[in-house]
Image (cartoon, grey):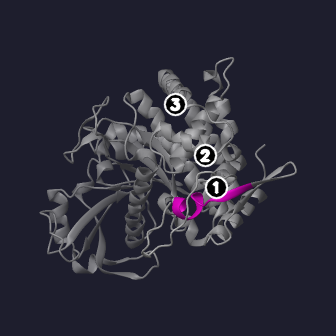
Amino acid sequence: MVCPSLVGSYPCVRVEGSGRGVVSQAGAVLLVGTVRKTGLDTAISTALSPWRKPRAVHDPGKILLDVALAVALGGDCLADVGMLRAEPALFGPVASDPTVSRLIDTLADGGQKALNAIRSARYHVRRHVWKLAGQDAPDATGSVTVDLDGVLVIAHSDKEDTAATWKKTFGHHPLMGFVDHGIGGSGEPVAGLLRPGNAGSNTAADHITAAQLALVQLPTSYRRGRSTLIRTDSAGGTHEFVTWLAQRGRWLSYSVGMTITAAIHQAVLKVPSAAWTPAVEPDRQIRDGAWVAELTGSMLDGWPKGMRLVVRKERPHPGAQLRITDADGMRITCFATNTTGRPVAELELRHRLRARAEDRIRAARATGLRNLPLHDTAQNRVWLEIVQIALDLLAWMPMLALQGKARLWEPRRLRLRLLGAAGQLVTTGRRQILRLARHWPWTHLLTSALERLDQLPNPG
C-alpha cells in the first residue's frame, strides 16, 4: 500500500497478506465454550446419527452446528460456513459447501422426523442449561413466560410458499415463540412455525400449533398449569385459541391482546372515573398519562370461565393519530387474562412487557431470519431450526457467562464487541494458546466470561 503525500485523518499502514497465527472471530471461543459446556454438540450428533452414512467423514450434527455457529456470527446463507473453515484451530474440521448442501437436502427429505430429532436435542440441552444457570434461569421464579409473535420475512425471488403479505410485501410469515428471560436478560426461541406469506395474523390453528411447539421445549413441569404464561398481541385474541389455553387439564395462564370491538368501545365510555387506576412502570412508579380498568358484563359471554378483560387508556404520543376505536382523545388498548388475585395495574404492566418480543424478533432478523436463503419449504424449515440453534447459543452464552448490562446485549453488539475480537494463536510445546489483544476495550469482559464457562461442570 502506497501512502499519499498528503496526511489524512487516519494513519497509513502497509498491508501484507502473509500474516501467520492470526485468528479472525477469535471471540467465538465463547460460543464454542458454550457448545462444549452445554453438551449441544453431543446431543445434536446423537439426534442426527440416523442420517449419517456409514463411511461419512463429517458428522451430520457437527455440520449442522457449524452452520448455526456461522449464523450466530452474522452469516445468512449456507456458504458463510466458510468463515469457520478458515479457522480450523478454533472450529476443527469443517465440511465443504457441497457436503453442507447435501446434508440440508437429506434432512429436508427426512421431513418431520428430522425436525423432531433436532428439537428433541434442543429440549434436552435447554433443560440442562437452565439447571446450570441457577438463579439466572428463566424459571428461577417458579414460572415461565412464552411470547408468541409473527414476523414477515421478505423474499426477493420466487420460492416455494412465498406469497403477498398483509403489509403488501412478498415472502413468508413465520410464527415464532420465545421464552422471556425478564428485565435482566434477553430471551431464547422455543417455537418456529414456517408459514406462507399470506398466512393470517390471527389464525387460531397456527397459534395452537406454535404454542404446542413451545410447550414441548419446556421442562415437563411447565407444559401445563398456571406457572406457564402464554402472551400474544391481538392476533391471539380468538375464541378458539383462548379456549384451547384454558382447556380443562391444560390450565395455562394467558395474557392475550384483544381487538377493540364496538361493544368494548361503548363499555369503555361508561367506565366511571373512580374505576380507573393509574398504570405503573417496571420500577413501580406511576406511568404518566395512562390508566387501566377492568370490564365486566355481557362482553365476557361465550368466553372461557374466569377470563378477565382489562383496558388501558393513554394520552397518545405527540404527533400520533387517533384511531376510530379510541375514545375521549385517549389511545385505547385491551387484553384478556385468566390471572386472579393481582391488581389490574400489575397485570397490565405484565402484558405491556410483551413488547420485549419485538426485541427478540429484531435479534432473529439479525441472526439468519432476514431472509430464507433456500428454495423449497422443507429446506427452509431446516434453516429455521438452524436459526433457532444460533439464537439459543446467543441467549445461553450471556446467561451462563456474562453479567450486568452485557447480558442485555443483542446479537449485533455481541458480535461487534466480543465475538469479532481478533487474536493470535501461539503454539508452545504441545499446547495452543489464543492471545487476545490487550488494548481491546472488552478483552477483560471476554476473558472473565471464559473463566465462568470453565468453572461450569462438564456435561455427563
Picture quarter with the C terminus: top right
- Image position of 58 (left or right of 381): right
Q: Secondary structure at mark 2?
A: loop
Residue 432 image position (x, y, % from top left): 79, 51
The kind of secondary structure element at disc 1 is: helix
Residue 61 against residue 324 in the figure, above or below: above
Residue range corresponding to the magenta coloring:
414-425
Q: On the rendered structure, is 440 left or right of 376?
A: right
N-term-proximal mark, 2 vs 1? 1
What amino acid is labelled 3 in the image? Leu
Q: Amino acid at mark 2?
A: Pro
x and y, in percent, of residue 4 in the image: 44, 69
Residue drawn at the location 44% of the way across and 48% of the way down? 177
Q: Which residue is mark 3?
A: 115
Tell me the crowding category of disc 3: few under 14, some 14 to 19, or many 20 or more residues within 10 angstroms, Cα based: some
Residue ID for mark 1: 26
Q: What is the C-alpha distance between the residues marked 3 and 2?
A: 19 Å
Closer to us: 234 or 5 = 5
Distance of mark 3 from mark 1, alpha carbons? 31 Å
Per the rendering, the mark at residue 219 is: 2
Where is residue 282? Give x, y as percent: 45, 74
Badge 2 vs badge 1, beta-carbon distance below 8 Å: no
Task: State the residue at coordinates (56%, 55%).
Answer: 395
Disc 3 element: helix
The residue at the far left in this view is 324
